[in-house]
Image (spheres, rainbow, N blue to C red):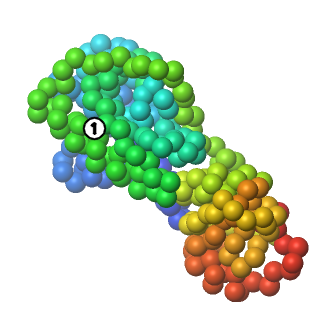
């Protein structure tokens, strides 16, 4: 098993192994962090999931590898396919079992399944569904054979990694756009110079409040409104938005985003 190196994670930034490493060690699977370790294993096939690095051609020459990729290739090749599908407002996503090449997510496809992308589902919920479907496809490949892969058809679109600044809410955007950002899980805004994370919210495409203006738990946007459900103020635990609002003394001119 190859996985990323131990990192500082969670509260306190304690150095911990990846979840994959933890589970592998529980069942006695050797774990390494360097791809060169693959040259020392005697296996017929390797399976790659969310590894995030190009596999060198000399490794591919000695070990067949397939990748479980969470998009409908060739759309959303790259590091953040599920996030980009949600942000784009795609009606469908999917999962592919594909042959790995020395270029990014360009290999032919052994299996593909299309999945409706709910306008309410969070990033974690979508990923969990894609994982389940992907496992089913992999098991099917292993049970009856991979068969002959089919080339990717269509225009390639790349899903670049989500940058920290992209998680900041721009209240001049539409309510539906902002809601899609909130579904990713790390959306934030400012109030009196302090960060406020919006963990859960609903939206309404109607309404004419000014962008960022708060009325109760409703925030105006460039088109429509966001209904706050769960928030996390800077330095505090998450709490229902109504409880947070009730504990504040907001003036009539207060706007989120400042």
Query: In the orientation shown, which residue stands out farthest toward the right?
Result: 253
Front residue of 20/137: it is 137
Instruction: Tell me the residue at 27%/25% (across/down).
Output: 110
Q: Is residue 248 left or right of residue 57?
A: right
Residue that mark 1 sits on? 1
Instruction: Tell me the residue at 64%/63% (across/down).
Output: 204
Q: Is residue 159 above or below residue 252?
A: above
Q: Position of residue 106 (x, y in %)?
A: 42, 20
Q: Position of residue 54 (x, y in %)?
A: 44, 25
| Residue 68 in view in this figure | no
| Residue 148 in view in this figure | yes
For the N terminus, which image quadrant? top left
Label 1 packing within 10 angstroms: few (<14), some (14-19), many (20+): some
Front residue of 51/172: it is 172
Front residue of 170/100: it is 170
Label 1 residue SS: loop
Q: Position of residue 223 (x, y in %)?
A: 73, 56
Instruction: Tell me the residue at 18%/31% (across/down).
Output: 141
How many numbered discs?
1
Instruction: Tell me the residue at 63%/71% (across/down).
Output: 228
Q: Is residue 164 above or below residue 148?
A: below
Q: Position of residue 65 (x, y in %)?
A: 28, 24
> Where on the picture, by quarter, is residue 135?
top left
For the C terminus, which image quadrant? bottom right
């Amino acid at each position: 098993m190859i996985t990323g190196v131990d990192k500082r994670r969670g509260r306190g930034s304690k150095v911990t192994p990846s979840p994959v490493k933890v589970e592998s060690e529980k069942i006695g699977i050797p774990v390494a962090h360097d791809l060169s370790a693959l040259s020392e294993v005697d296996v017929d096939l390797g399976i790659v999931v969310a590894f995030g690095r190009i596999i060198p051609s000399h490794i591919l020459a000695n070990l067949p590898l397939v990748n479980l990729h969470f998009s409908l290739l060739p759309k959303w090749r790259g590091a953040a396919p599920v996030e980009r599908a949600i942000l784009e407002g795609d009606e469908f996503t999917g999962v592919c079992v594909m042959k790995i090449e020395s270029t990014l997510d360009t290999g032919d496809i052994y299996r593909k399944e299309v999945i409706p992308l709910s306008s309410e589902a969070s990033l974690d919920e979508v990923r969990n569904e894609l994982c389940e479907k992907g496992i089913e496809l992999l098991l099917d490949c292993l049970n009856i054979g991979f068969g002959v892969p089919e080339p990717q058809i269509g225009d390639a679109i790349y899903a670049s990694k989500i940058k920290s600044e992209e998680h900041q809410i721009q209240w001049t955007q539409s309510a539906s756009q902002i809601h899609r950002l909130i579904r990713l899980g790390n959306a934030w805004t400012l109030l009196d110079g302090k960060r406020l994370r919006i963990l859960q919210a609903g939206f309404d495409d109607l309404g004419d409040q000014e962008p960022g203006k708060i009325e109760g738990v409703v925030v105006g946007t460039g088109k429509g409104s966001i209904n706050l459900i769960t928030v996390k103020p800077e330095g505090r635990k998450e709490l229902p938005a109504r409880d947070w609002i009730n504990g504040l003394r907001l003036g009539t001119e207060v706007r989120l985003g400042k």
